[in-house]
């Protein structure tokens, strides 16, 4: 693969992250920003924002693109929702994003922990908008229903890549199941915004990306993020292509013309990056 192009030159300055990192360590909390080696970490942490990672930091899936550790997780931390809510309060967040590792070892996939976290944030910071980025819960409708009934402002679930690449990129996931998660949310409560994201650079073709955008609109997905894949670890799936910024603009225009309410599309875009902008 060729060297990184000039538009992929964002620098990470961990010194600007120290204040937020101390708070996270004090409250014994994880973030997807740290666990997945997000390139936007210093930009977001320096502004006092982070995407909280609940249900531990060990995932039961083995997605080829993800930097989160894989293995056998420990039990559910019953005090975690309280600590997340305390962090949201201390940071005075107007918009909080909560995600999780996938927990196939739990009967409900961890849905109850999402609900408890949402409710605790509402207790401590009632004006804070809440976005949850959920796993597929193995397609469990009751788990999705739990999340919907808690009424977060946005429910996200990332498609991540095109169907053809699922066996390689997301071997324990299923494209139809993921699409159906978004469909279920809208069917249960059409007032909740839904959001999904694609990572580009795995070797997908233009027509495949456009087909996924059409499929997302067919299930009434409201928001979309498109970003460049950058391997988080040496042994991660290799980059097949660096997508030019103009191509990201091209996909953004197609997505907006197909009916998405808001689209963030660019090399450094991640599903939780600039999340507050989607509701403006």
Image (tube, rainbow, N blue to C red):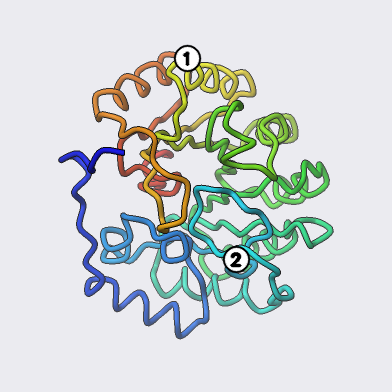
Per the image, label 2 sits on a secondary structure element best described as strand
**Which residue shows up at 38% across the image and 56% down it?**
38
C-alpha separation, residue under disc 1 versus residue under disc 2: 35 Å
> Mark 2 — residue?
54
Q: Which label sits in the foreground, 1 or 2?
A: 1
> Mark 1 — residue?
207
In the drawing, does residue 147 fall left or right of residue 1? right
Q: Which of 187 and 10 is in front in this view?
A: 10
Using the rendered view, name the quadrant where residue 81 is placed.
bottom right
In contact (CB < 8 Å): disc 1 and disc 2 = no
Extreme-front residue of the structure? 1
Q: Which of marks 1 and 2 is nearer the N terminus?
A: 2
Query: Looking at the picture, does residue 11 appear above or below residue 214?
Result: below
Per the image, label 1 sits on a secondary structure element best described as helix
Whole-percent x, y for residue 3 in the image: 23, 42
Whole-percent x, y for residue 1 in the image: 31, 39
Q: How crowded is mark 1: few (under 14 residues within 10 Å), some or many (20 or more)?
A: few
Q: Which of 115 and 99 is in front in this view?
A: 99
Extreme-left residue of the structure? 6
**Which residue shows up at 68% across the image and 77% down it?**
77
Give the quarter of the figure containing the C terminus.
Answer: top left
Whole-percent x, y for residue 252 in the image: 36, 24
Find residue 186 and name its label.
Answer: none
In the drawing, does residue 102 fall left or right of residue 8? right
Query: Looking at the picture, does residue 215 appear above or below residue 119?
Result: above
**Which residue shows up at 66% across the image and 42% down it?**
171
């Amino acid at each position: 693969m060729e060297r990184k192009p000039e538009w992929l030159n964002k620098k990470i300055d961990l010194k600007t992250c120290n204040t937020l990192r101390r708070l996270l360590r004090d409250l014994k909390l994880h973030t997807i920003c740290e666990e997945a080696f997000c390139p936007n970490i210093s930009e977001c942490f320096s502004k006092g924002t982070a995407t909280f990672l609940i249900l531990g930091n060990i995932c039961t899936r083995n997605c080829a693109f993800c930097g989160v550790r894989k293995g056998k997780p420990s039990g559910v931390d019953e005090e975690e929702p309280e600590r997340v809510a305390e962090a949201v309060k201390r940071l005075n967040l107007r918009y909080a994003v909560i995600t999780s590792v996938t927990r196939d070892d739990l009967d409900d996939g961890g849905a109850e922990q999402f609900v408890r976290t949402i409710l605790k944030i509402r207790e401590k910071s009632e004006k804070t908008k809440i976005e949850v980025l959920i796993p597929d819960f193995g397609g469990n409708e009751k788990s999705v229903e739990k999340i919907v009934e808690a009424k977060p402002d946005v429910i996200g679930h990332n498609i991540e890549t095109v169907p053809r690449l699922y066996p390689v990129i997301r071997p324990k996931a299923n494209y139809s199941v993921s699409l159906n998660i978004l469909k279920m949310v809208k069917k249960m409560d059409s007032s909740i915004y839904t959001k999904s994201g694609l990572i580009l650079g795995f070797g997908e073709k233009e027509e495949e990306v456009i087909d996924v955008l059409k499929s997302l609109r067919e299930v009434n997905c409201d928001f979309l993020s498109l970003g460049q894949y950058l391997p988080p670890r040496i042994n991660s799936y290799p980059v097949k292509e660096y997508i030019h910024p103009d191509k990201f603009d091209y996909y953004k225009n197609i997505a907006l013309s197909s009916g998405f309410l808001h689209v963030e599309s660019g090399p450094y875009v991640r599903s939780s990056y600039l999340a507050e902008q989607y509701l403006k």
